[in-house]
Amino acid sequence: MRKEDKGPVIEQITATLKEYSHIYLTETTTLNAEKTSNLRRECFKNDIKLLVVKNTLLKKALENLDADYSSLYDSLKGSTTLMLSNTGNAPAKLIKSFKKDNDQLAFKAAYVEESFYDASQLDALVAIKSKNELIAEVIALLQSPAKNVVSALQSGGTTIHGVLKTLAER
């Protein structure tokens, strides 16, 4: 690749990285064409962007961003495939489920929720809850006391009604 061609490619990678808040680095070179197509299909279903990039161009694109991604630089060896998402745990869940059938997919590192994770921390990434999951939990917790009060009032009302009815009959 000529030097003049690298500039626009780096800018394009930088622009793509700015669109997504979570970055996963994987290696897919050992996958055959069918498995790669299946991975791309699953990424599309889960709203994950899959890009195969050159390590040097990715490093320059990461250097152009505001945050410090230097912890990812050690993982830029061999072939690198980017998995980009705005849901923190979606790529981790996809990688884990895909690895059950295809042991050849390798997870290298990730930048999720403003933290860096290495290859040994895939299970921790799967356990991270997404923003929507956290909002649902908070709403459920907020609704729980109100449901308990309404339930107590409804059951108490029938008890009081029964006691008053018994007293009226006497």
Image (spheres, rainbow, N blue to C red):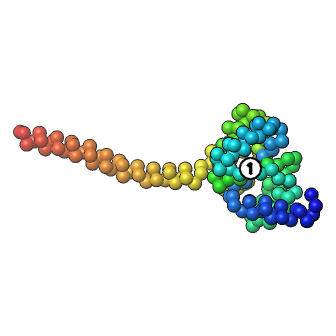
In the image, 5: left or right of 83? right
Q: Which residue lies furthest to the top in this view?
A: 101
Specify the quadrant that holds the C terminus. top left
Q: Residue at x 21, y 43 (%)?
A: 158
**Based on the displayed image, in which of its 4 quarters is residue 121 positioned?**
top right
* Residue at x 74% of width, y 49% of height: 50
Other-residue count near label 1 (Cα within 10 Å), few / some / many at <14 / 14–19 / ≥20: many
Helix, strand or loop for disc 1 = strand
Question: Is any part of residue 166 visible from this angle?
Answer: yes
Instruction: Residue 27 in the image: state x and y as whole percent.
Output: 81, 44
Camera-side residue of 42 and 69: 42
Q: Reply above or below: 92 against 111.
A: above
Where in the figure is residue 19, as x and y percent of width and height? 69, 61
Which residue was labeled with disc 1?
Answer: 50
Where is residue 5? Give x, y as percent.
Answer: 89, 62
Place of residue 154 in the rendered image (x, y in percent of width and height, measured from the top left): 26, 46
Amino acid type assigned to the residue bearing label 1 in the image: Leu
Task: Give the residue drawn at x 80%, y 54%.
Answer: 72
Query: Looking at the rendering, which quadrant does residue 21 occupy?
Result: bottom right
